[in-house]
Image (cartoon, grey):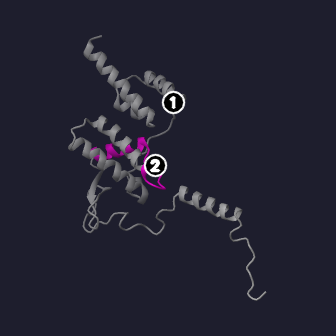
Amino acid sequence: MSEKSLLNEMQQVQLAIDLIELGARLQVLETETDLSRGRLIRLYKEVRGVSPPKGMLPFSTDWFVTWLPNIHSSLFYNIYESLVLSHGCERMEAFVKAYRLYLEHVELAEDSEVVLGLTRAWTLVRFFESEMLELVRCTSCSGRFVAHAHAPRRGYVCGICQPPSRAGKTRKHREASLEASANAGDAGFGDAPLAVAGG
């Protein structure tokens, strides 16, 4: 094996490891690396300690334009595009870096949880490459958000500037509210009898 092909194979293995660590499905690995399916399965088991999950990849663009997924998808894709256009990163290098930066942003944000899994992030990039999705500028905040390609842009307002009525009612938010209520009950708040004036 030549030095060049050995180096290329090492890069392919490292890319596969990076993607597996970030939660990639086997279909993503097969598409983005030249490694054999058998080798990828062995690598997956070695890195994650389990066999790769089975099942179809997400295939609808609609998920990316719903409220919370849209905010997370837009954050990720703006980072990805910046790494490709402004920093000259190769496609998959930019993808891995952008996804790591997205995870860091979510980690730093208070009361936030990861909404965009790696496989969905990869599907998002593929939808942009297929010109099924595009970034549209919000007329209120000037941020750029994921939208269906060729949809009317006039007067577009993002989900941050104009959130839906149930915005923020995530499972984590509901669980935190339930826990706070339970803690309040344990502490005796709300259970004490009302004091009667003059009694």
> In this orientation, does residue 73 appear?
yes
Q: Is residue 122 visible?
A: no
Whole-percent x, y for residue 60 in the image: 40, 50
Quadrant in which the N terminus is drawn? top left
- Label 2: state its secondary structure: loop
Residue at image location 25% in from the left, 46% down from the top: 82
Image x and y of residue 174, in percent? 57, 60
Indicate the secondary structure of the residue bearing disc 1.
helix
Q: Which residue is mark 2?
A: 114
Q: Which mark is residue 97?
A: none
Rendered image: mark on residue 48: 1
> Which quadrant would residue 26 be assigned to in this image?
top left
User: Looking at the image, which is closer to me, 116 or 62?
Assistant: 116
Q: CA distance from mark 1 to mark 2?
A: 19 Å
Q: Position of residue 139 (x, y in %)?
A: 26, 66
* Main SS of residues in magenta: helix
Query: Residue at horizontal 74%, vertical 81%?
Result: 195
Q: Which residues are magenta?
A: 107-129
